[in-house]
Image (cartoon, helix red, strand yellow):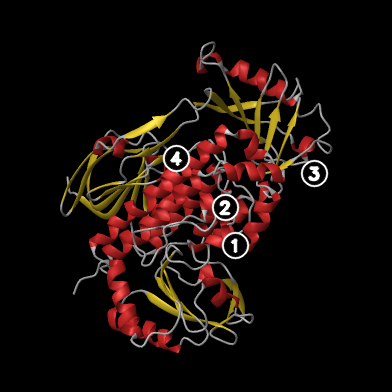
Amino acid sequence: MPVEHVPVLITGGSTVGLSTAVSLAQHGLRPMLVERRDGTLIHPRATGLHPSAREFFRSAGVEAQMREASAVLVNSLTKFSVTTLAGDDLSKVERVGTPPEDVVVATRRMSPTDVSPCAQDQIDRVLVAAAVERGVDVRFSTELVSLTQDESGVTATLLDRVTGERQTVRADYLVGADGSSSRVRELLGIPMEIEDRLGNPMIHILFDADLSDLVRGNEFNFCEIWHPDYEGLLLSINNKDRWVFHRSYDEDKESAADYPEERCLELIKGAIGLPDLEVKILATLPWRISAGVADAVRDGRVFLAGDAIHVIPPIGGFGMSTGIADAYNLSWKLAMVLNGHAGPGLLDTYSQERLPVADFTREQAVLRLRFMALHWDPRPEAEQERNMLRIADPLVTNSGYQYTEGAVIGARQELPSILDVEQNLDGSPGSRLPHVWVERKGEKVSTLDLAGTGFALLTGPNATGWQRAGQSVAEQTGLPLTVHRIGPDAEIDDPGNRFAAVAGIGTEGALLVRPDNFVAWRATGAHPESREQLAGVLDALLHRTA
């Protein structure tokens, strides 16, 4: 049987694997993605989307589809507690913002995206369609059995779970995005120490029930049910007929086997407070809050991403967005190497950048879990307590972190703030590019829209030297590099000259922005040998040798 060759083989057809596939396709590659299940999961799992995830979708050209998929939850930004859903006046219950109002306001300042949640099963359906449309070879019911690697690539044995046939695939690189019980991580022998005693085990019940009349005008994200017989957490999936009920149980007294369909129906009807409600159980899933980070994210030509690297407690909703950021980071680096624009040393920076972020995110989620009351508390006094405990603002955790080494030059080693994300997004190398609304040919765009799939050199309004340098380097090297002069009446119109100030480049400086919208390098003014300086910076960043 002939051996099929692909540039990248991705194992795992959930959000992170699909995001990796879509991003690689954006860079002109045609990866293969395999998933052992017969389709995407029907369990919504998560609904929280942080700005970094939505910004990835924007860059990948699926923002409109994601907005449509999340439209049913646009008003689901609160949490409240009731005895039963039907037994309390939902218009009068005290609500807590999810996210809090200050986070919503800050998000609208620091990101071009919106803040509404979206169910993960809907996200995956959008990503599958986008991957197939872009030429990704998506194969469900296909399982990775074994892998070997050498200096030139990875050989994988795949099993068709329908026909029982086996196939050999040869890939230049392999990405394991196959979840917390990663088969790829197991085959590589990479340890992950899991802390799994962070709370009681839970049962996750996905069900259909038409509650549209009950919640209309009083939509929510989470509803805590405090009835002594039916205690649990109700999660809205579409504010109409699809919901999830989470219930924890004492493992010394019960197990998942104690939740057959009959009992699940009883719990749901009791929690809602409508004993005659028509309910259909779609699926149940036992799970437990746990935390862990793998000892490594790479072995040779094989990489890990998402839950295969980090298991993040759900409080704060950081897990899915962190995994998408892994995909965003890794995909452009693989593409640069495979397309001949970078040396293989660039791939070493994936570990340097993403492992510290995984550790930081896990630490923050565990802190929030241990101080759960503070997580939901909107009072100023609670903010002071969170600061004393070093609990970072959620936007800092997800978007305001810093790469201190890797594919960056001149990175600072400490964050200016764990509370104010905008202090961190100041144009420093290693930080996410500051968002500023500007105009390009009369169209309102974000500075985050300017890099595309290559590097971008964003210059101040009077930085003609850097502008010429960028154009010359792009022409002579063939690197994917675009140059944008930003300022009043410049190519990118910024009437208030706000970007130059926010990015710390003045009128004659420049930012070099990576394809994942992180700042790679910054010049705060003019340079007498700007072309040579820029060429040297790019060679160093991309591990290019003469």
SS under mark 1: helix
Residue 217's disc is 3
State the residue position of label 4. 39
Query: Counting other residues with Cα less than 10 Å from the Cα at mark 4, is it few (<14), some (14-19), or many (20 or more)?
Result: some
Outermost residue toward the left?
151
State the count of labels.
4
Q: Which mark is residue 395?
A: 2
Quadrant where the N terminus lies?
Answer: top left
Q: Which amino acid, by three-letter code, is at mark 3?
A: Gly
Q: Is residue 396 above or below residue 213?
A: below
* Label 2, label 3: how far apart the Cα atoms are: 28 Å
Closer to the camera, 156 or 461? Answer: 461
Left or right: where 368 falls relative to 344: right
The disc, 2 or 1, on the residue closer to the chain's N-terminal end is: 1
Residue 428, percent from left and from top: 46, 66
Q: Tell me whether circle 4 and circle 3 mark residues in contact (CB < 8 Å).
A: no
Question: What is the CA distance from the residue labelled 4 to the residue labelled 1?
Answer: 36 Å
- Classify mark 1: residues with Cα within 10 Å, few (<14), some (14-19) or many (20+): some
Q: Is residue 44 above or below residue 531?
A: above
Q: Which residue was labeled with disc 1?
A: 110
Are the residues at dot 2 and dot 3 in contact (C-beta closer than 8 Å)?
Answer: no
Q: In the rendered image, which quarter is residue 34 located in?
A: top left
Residue type of the residue flagged with mark 2: Leu
User: Is disc 2 surrounded by few (<14), some (14 to 19) or many (20+) residues within 10 Å?
Assistant: many
Q: Is residue 387 left or right of residue 256?
A: right
Q: Residue 533 has which mark?
A: none
| Residue type, numbered disc 1 | Met
Question: Which circle, 3 or 1, is nearer the viewer?
Answer: 1
How far is mark 4 from mark 3, CA to CA? 34 Å
Residue 314 seen in render: no
